[in-house]
Image (tube, rainbow, N blue to C red):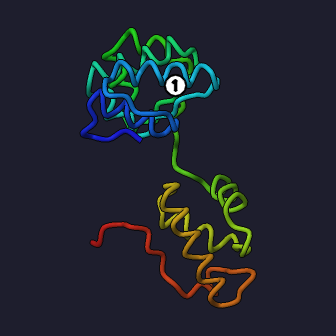
Amino acid sequence: RAKKLWTPLSMMQSICDELSIDRQRSAVACQDSIIEALALENRPLFIDEADYVVESASMVEAIRDIHDMSMVPVILIGMKNFAKKIKRFPQFDNRVMQWVEFAHCDMEDARKIVSAMSDKVEIADDLLEALVAESKGEVRRIVVGLYQIEIYAVNNDKKTLSLKEFKGQFHLGHAGV
């Protein structure tokens, strides 16, 4: 995960930490170690919150070098308007193989999240619909709500749970109004 206060050196050292390789004292030495490790393992590099990376031309160029020299995919995960931010760096932008934009979850998506996460309780459609509506389809808030549902079900010895039975209130991190 990228950080707001990253410099090229701290970015390289963080990537070294994630790859479980020794940190070097210089950004160049770290980058060389990263390139070698990624190429040997044929392992892609994921960077979440990449909006912070594209604020710095030197960090963008460092990532481009990693991509070009390791020949592994680099997956950048950014927020809204991320594509517009990348366009400022044509030599980087023209390496983008695919843009994927995530939309808000619908019921079908929510069911997939439930099947991947929750094996302790069967959640009725009406409760799941309420959660999707309350969360406004945001994945992180749906996951938080599913955790709350699961805790409620376990604490009340329920194997299935409907909206009527769920006596709790979702606490999904929305600011109070």
Q: Residue at the location (74% across, 69% down)?
A: 119
Q: Which quadrant does the N terminus fall into?
A: top left
The vertical placement of 149 against 165, above or below, is above
The answer to whether residue 6 is left or right of residue 151 is left
Q: Nearer the viewer, residue 118 or 164?
A: 118
Q: Which quadrant does the C terminus fall into?
A: bottom left
Q: Quadrant of residue 112?
A: bottom right
The answer to whether residue 139 is left or right of residue 63 is right
Look at the numbered disc 1 and give the secondary structure of its residue: strand
Q: Position of residue 136 (x, y in %)?
A: 47, 59
Q: Quadrant of residue 25?
A: top left
Q: Position of residue 87 (x, y in %)?
A: 35, 17
The vertical placement of 112 against 11, above or below, is below
Q: Quadrant of residue 88?
A: top left
The vertical placement of 177 against 94, above or below, is below
The answer to whether residue 57 is left or right of residue 37 is left
How many discs appear? 1
Q: Position of residue 52 (x, y in %)?
A: 31, 35
Q: Position of residue 23 (x, y in %)?
A: 40, 33
Amino acid type of the residue that numbered disc 1 sits on in the rendered structure: Val
The vertical placement of 114 against 91, above or below, is below
Q: Residue at the location (35% across, 21% down)?
A: 60
> What residue sits right under mark 1 in the picture?
74
Q: Residue at the location (64% across, 52% down)?
A: 109
Q: Residue at the location (52% across, 40% down)?
A: 102
Mark 1, other Cα within 10 Å: few <14 / some 14–19 / many ≥20: some
